[in-house]
Amino acid sequence: MIFKSVFLVLVMFSANVLASEVSLYDAKIGEFKSDDEKSVNLKDFAGKKVVISMVYTSCQSACPLMIKKLLKIEKKLKEESVNAQFVVVSFDSKFDTPKKMSLFRVSQGITNPNWKLLVGNDKDTRFLSNLLEIRYSRNPEDETISHDNKVIFLNEKGVIVQTSEGLSYDSKEKVF
Amino acid sequence: MHSIVIILFFLLGGVEASSPPKGKVHIPAGEFSPLYGLDVLQKSFKIEAFDVDVNPVTNKDYAAFLKTHPEWTKNKVFPLFVDSKYLDYWRSDSKYNALSDAPITMISWYAAGAFCESKNGRLLTTLEWEYIAAASETQADASKDPELNQKLLDLYSKPQIDTSKQSVKLGKPNFYGVKNLHGIIWEWTNDFNSFFIASDNRSDGDKSKNMFCGAGSIGAKEKENYAAFIRYGYRGSLQARYATKNLGFRCAYTTSSVVEEKKK
């Protein structure tokens, strides 16, 4: 019995190791559009530490708080002298556009021009969300979107190193 | 060249244009009120017409797919697209410990989606799946039929059946002619991880509460439809990489006949 559970732990462990060494960028995700109307391939972020999250612009309460959380993380990383690429992807492939994302950038007080605010098609958005393990669904009645509030940290290779759930961030530990 | 084909197609008559190919059935547009809504006054939602596989995809179907798409074989598949149990009852890329007409299981959302795409199809949306799954053999919407609900609950409470020994050929067609939606396996949907509740929840913990806790389930629209309740809870627990023994899929198609209907 003890042997059996040790074996199980080993199996789980080896599976985790396998997945944790794989780059997200090798998943061949389609291109997204940035808020300055440029095509962005997620692969372009290889070689950088990446902080990525998903929101949508007509979201009233949770999403602005997610941006606040990201801004807080940006400040913390700056204090730690860590250079990271911030990426915000819209859930709302139906209504969000680069133009809307660009207005969202201003309204949310994102002053760092290096942040990428991206919109993709329905298929690629769903695909990316599953790779990041961020759940969402559209309520067909009022077009609002229910979603997880997660920030994902990727290392230079595109491997997920940490996930931060929830709307607040007060971790004292180093991410990268 | 294309236009000649199209003209010929029309000359052959409207019957061909509107009847789906073998193995698929046409699902007419309609309205459906799913289990979860923002409130009790929730309207029903319009569903566009689509075609759907009569049966879940079988081991035989998947073996044929692996021949033409070796990137999905166990040895070559991209590790983030599957977990360690992907196709674990398959001894090779063509041999498996199961009936060839049994539904494929131990399959991830990514693999299921790739299969459907290879057939010019897609996975059903959760709303589409629940729409056709609400049918009994005689009624289009039997979601409030206590008899059907009891039947489903009996199915769900049974110990897990051996899916490898269940041929899809044995299933009875429902109102639409779709078979085996209930009974052998659960099925992936494109937006499987959906939860139809208010999006304004500030705390993360609230999201799934409506599906699992007794007190929280007040948001559910049809409390008598406990079977659908279980399905939403099950789907919400999945991740796209997961392979499990009782989870398979079928494909939907936005077909030319559907496009024709829209034009009219």
Image (spheres, coloured by chain):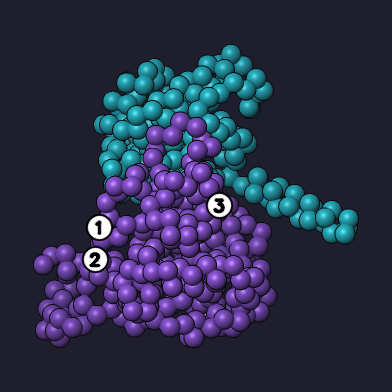
Chain colours: A cyan, B purple
Q: Quadrant of residue A118?
A: top left
Estimate the spatial distance between the alpha carbons at disc 1 and disc 3, rounded to whole Å.
27 Å
In this rendering, position of residue B12 left or right of residue B102: left
User: Which residue shows up at 21% across the image and 82% down it?
Assistant: B16
Other residues around mark 1 within 10 Å, as few (<14) / some (14–19) / many (≥20): some
The residue most toward the top is A79
Q: Could you give the CA–CA distance between mark 2 and mark 3, rounded to whole angstroms?
A: 30 Å
Amino acid residing under circle 2: Ala
Labels 1 and 2 touching (C-beta < 8 A): yes
Label 2: which residue? B29
Q: Position of residue B158 (x, y in %)?
A: 61, 71
**Badge 1 or badge 2: first in the primary sequence:** 2
Q: CA distance from mark 1 to mark 2?
A: 7 Å
Residue that numbered label 1 is attached to: B46
Q: Amino acid at mark 1?
A: Lys
Task: Characterize the local packing of mark 2: few (<14), some (14-19) or many (20 or more) Cα atoms within 10 angstroms.
Answer: few
Instruction: Assign the N terminus of chain B to one quadrant of the image.
Output: bottom left
Q: Quadrant of the C terminus of chain B?
A: bottom left
SS at circle 3:
loop
Image coordinates of residue B101 in percent, x first then y, are: 53, 83
- Chain to which the residue tagged by mark 1 belongs: B
Q: Residue at x 42, y 78 (%)?
A: B179
The residue at which mark 3 appears reads as B237
Q: Residues within 10 Å of mark 3 (few under 14, many from 20)?
A: few
Q: Secondary structure at mark 2?
A: loop
Q: Position of residue B3 (x, y in %)?
A: 13, 74
